[in-house]
Image (spheres, grey):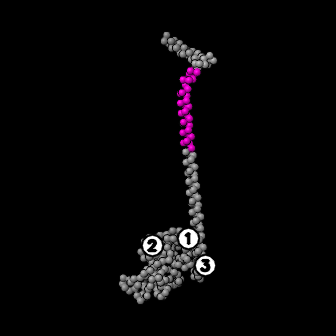
Amino acid sequence: MAKNKKINSWFLIGLFLILAILFFNSKQNKPLQSFFYNVNKPFARVFSGMGGWFSDKISFVSNIGDLKKENEELFNENLKLKFDLSQIKEAENENKILRKELELMAKADFEVEASLILGQTLSQNRKIIYLDKGAKNGFKEGMPVIVGGGILIGKISKVYKNSSEAELVLDKNNKINAEIQEIQVKGIVQGEYGTSAVMDMIPQTAEIQTGQTVITSGLGETYPRGLLIGSIKKKEMTVDQLFQKAFLELPIQFNNLRMVWIIKNVK
């Protein structure tokens, strides 16, 4: 009995829905349709407005993303242009240095070969530069290293197949037979504390003056005579009072070096 009532209830609901559809679709019920349209109209406007608002916000966020991407591309392009410009300037600077060095070396009486500096070790006691050429290019230990046509900066200390090391004038291990040019007094130049070069073993009787020129003396087999080392900045007596000692002012800054010349033979 209960089951039959339930079936009858669903049948009546279905019938009611069919009649309602037919009723609202008939031409005679336009006023009633209008009533339902007017009741739903405010809600439709609200939902329509919300849809437009969400659409605008989505479009705004999308535009921001596109703009950010364009800005990143422009930024990266700007960085690349700056890098390219720096490379051009670097090449121009290197060409100027090379032209200047070539002009100076054309006047020198040495067989030389240019080498670029790969790096430096400038600690308290060791002053070493690393060169991009070695035994393959005929470099040997003891060969003098110069710049500017004849300014001594050191000597080759170690040689590898395609690279080499050079001890600078400031290195404590690099001892150079030197001479004060104006008075023809000889002594030994070497680095002291990694910050200066001094000429030692100068006789007490030598009349040393500030500004006098110090050159290689030519004694020994390492350095030819006449390479410029520096000039006398100040003097003092040694601790044992047996010799004089002169502190030198060097003509170049080792930190700024990019290219050097190795003397392979004296003409």
Question: For mark 1, does the 10 Å Cα neighbourhood hold few (<14), some (14 to 19), or many (20 or more) residues?
Answer: some
Q: Position of residue 251 (x, y in %)?
A: 50, 77
Is residue 181 a member of the stretch shown in magenta? Answer: no
Q: Which residue is mark 1?
A: 116
Coordinates of residue 63 in the picture (x, y in percent): 57, 44
Q: Main secondary structure of the magenta part?
A: helix
Q: Give whichever of discs 3 and 1 has the lower sequence position.
A: 3
Q: Which residues are magenta?
A: 34-63
Q: Which one is nearer the viewer's eye here, 244 or 5?
A: 244
When asked about the image quadrant of residue 48, the answer is top right
Closer to the camera in the image, 226 or 112: 226
| Callout 3 amino acid | Ala
Under mark 2, the amino acid is Arg
Who's the residue at 36% across and 84% down the image?
240
Front residue (pair 53, 229): 53
Q: Which mark is residue 126?
A: 2
Q: Could one spot residue 161 in this view of the protein? A: no
* Crowd around label 3: few <14 · some 14–19 · many ≥20 (10 Å): few
- Secondary structure type for disc 1: strand
* Residue at 55%, 74% in the rendered image: 260
The residue that disc 3 covers is 106
